[in-house]
Image (tube, rainbow, N blue to C red):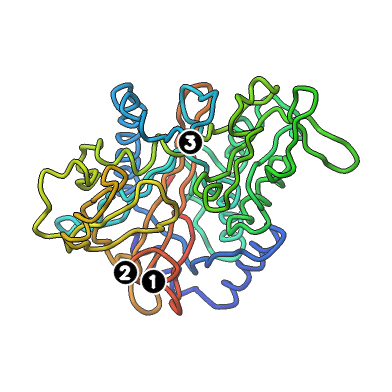
């Protein structure tokens, strides 16, 4: 988006520098990264940065309004509801495609989720890019006046709070098997907390405990990374965590599980802004659009792009047994706007928020780059300059 920075980066790029980046990431996360890292960051202009911020705040205001939240009762099925919900989320991710509109690059909403993202890994990624490439000092991935140090302080305030880090856990099912393990390791190093599987959390004497070293440690704060889709797929329940109000056991959620569903794809039909494409619950369609090739069908209760269908047929829509649990969203055409060493790449920018003392704060970003039809791995096999990265913007 900043031609002179893009040109300079591409001219200075070498495979050796990229391999150095990957080595530093592996070292910073105590093991290999389980997803592809793009060879380049994104260089965002002041203009597109301001528009991304405006779009993100506008959408955040809608999905945290009383009017929207009154509609979210059915977003959390009874079998997935967790007691003790907080009044506000702690985290929010808003994903924007960089699209073309009248010759301009503009943000267009793809999805959103009130759930943590790679807050720790993105900190490591910035450091690795700066070590191995010539990133101008006037460019930053952080927002709200934060820098590398104050960003880490912000995460500590949000996740650890006034607790002993030993009594704060990052909760995830079988964390060693997750693609996001790198973020867990980065977060452990950054905040001094432990990553714990729900299998290793037990209740004793009216407290939640986990075992570390040679002792049982009481849990006061739970940084939740458990995605309920996975619990369902694996037939897991963990009733001592998800069917109890953990406050009765001396703990609190950092990111209550219900928010994962309350602010999610469910919100898309309620967003009426130029930054969000038209979207409907299939059950509420006034009529089937004549140009279905320009629409995307999405299951309401799924994660990481599972079940998404491009250009569904009328027959497919009519055959859906539970149309209230499916969304039809107008397709966004990503702009091939990032010059690489071969063909241009497309980009999606995640704007990452965190709440502190009841107030949301935009703190970081995450970028995914693609040269395929969609952002997923299956659409970008054998391609380079694609995958996860971050966006730098002027400060």
x, y (%) of residue 316? 22, 60
Check disc 1 and report the residue beneath it.
Answer: 379
C-alpha separation, residue under disc 1 versus residue under disc 2: 6 Å
Callout 3 crowding tier (Cα within 10 Å): few <14, some 14–19, many ≥20: few
Q: Is residue 84 above or below residue 101?
A: above
Tell me which label, 1 or 2, sits earlier in the chain: 2
Which element is circle 2 on? loop
Which element is circle 1 on? helix
Check disc 3 and report the residue beneath it.
Answer: 79
x, y (%) of residue 294? 18, 60
Badge 1 vs badge 3, beta-carbon distance below 8 Å: no
Which residue sits at x=34%, y=58%?
308
x, y (%) of residue 332? 24, 57
Residue 365 horizontal side relative to residue 346, left or right: right
Query: Which quarter of the figure is the C terminus placed in?
Result: top left
- The mark found on residue 189 in the picture is none
Check disc 2 and report the residue beneath it.
Answer: 373
Q: Is residue 296 above or below residue 221?
A: below
Residue 137 horizontal side relative to residue 329, left or right: right
Badge 1 vs badge 2, beta-carbon distance below 8 Å: yes
Does the rendering let one see residue 192? no
C-alpha separation, residue under disc 3 versus residue under disc 2: 35 Å
Which residue sits at x=66%, y=68%?
23
Badge 3 vs badge 2, beta-carbon distance below 8 Å: no
Of residues 230 and 60, the one drawn nearer to the viewer in this rendering: 230
Callout 1 crowding tier (Cα within 10 Å): few <14, some 14–19, many ≥20: few
Q: Nearer the viewer's eye, disc 1 or disc 3?
A: 3
Q: Nearer the viewer's eye, disc 3 or disc 2?
A: 3
């Amino acid at each position: 988006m900043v031609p002179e920075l893009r040109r300079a980066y591409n001219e200075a790029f070498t495979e050796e520098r990229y391999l150095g980046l990957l080595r530093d990431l592996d070292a910073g996360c105590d093991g290999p990264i389980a997803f592809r890292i793009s060879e380049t960051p994104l260089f965002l202009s002041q203009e597109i940065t301001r528009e991304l911020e405006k779009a993100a705040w506008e959408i955040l205001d809608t999905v945290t309004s009383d009017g929207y939240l009154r509609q979210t009762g059915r977003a959390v099925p009874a079998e997935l509801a967790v007691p003790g919900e907080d009044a506000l989320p702690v985290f929010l991710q808003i994903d924007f495609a960089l699209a073309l509109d009248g010759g301009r690059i503009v943000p267009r909403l793809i999805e959103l989720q009130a759930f943590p993202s790679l807050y720790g890994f993105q900190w490591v990624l910035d450091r690795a890019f700066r070590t191995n490439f010539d990133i101008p000092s006037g460019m930053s991935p952080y927002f709200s006046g934060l820098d590398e140090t104050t960003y880490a302080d912000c995460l500590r305030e949000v996740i650890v709070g006034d607790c002993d880090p030993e009594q704060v856990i990052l909760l995830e099912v079988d964390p060693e098997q997750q693609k996001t393990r790198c973020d867990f390791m980065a977060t452990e190093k950054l905040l001094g907390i432990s990553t714990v599987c729900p299998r290793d959390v037990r209740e004793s004497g009216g407290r939640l405990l986990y075992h570390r070293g040679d002792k049982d440690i009481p849990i006061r704060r739970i940084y939740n990374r458990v995605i309920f889709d996975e619990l369902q797929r694996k037939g897991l329940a963990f009733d001592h965590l998800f069917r109890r109000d953990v406050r009765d056991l001396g703990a609190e959620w950092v990111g209550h599980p219900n928010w994962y569903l309350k602010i999610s794809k469910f919100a898309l039909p309620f967003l009426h802004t130029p930054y969000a494409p038209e979207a409907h619950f299939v059950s509420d369609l006034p009529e089937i659009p004549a140009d279905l090739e320009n629409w995307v069908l999405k299951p309401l209760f799924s994660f990481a792009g599972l079940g998404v269908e491009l250009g569904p047929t009328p027959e497919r829509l009519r055959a859906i047994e539970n149309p209230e649990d499916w969304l039809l969203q107008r397709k966004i055409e990503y702009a091939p706007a990032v010059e690489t060493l071969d063909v241009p790449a497309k980009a999606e920018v995640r704007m990452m928020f965190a709440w502190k003392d009841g107030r949301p704060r935009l703190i970081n970003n995450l970028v995914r780059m693609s040269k395929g039809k969609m952002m997923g791995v299956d659409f970008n096999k054998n391609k380079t300059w694609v995958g996860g990265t971050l966006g730098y913007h002027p400060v």
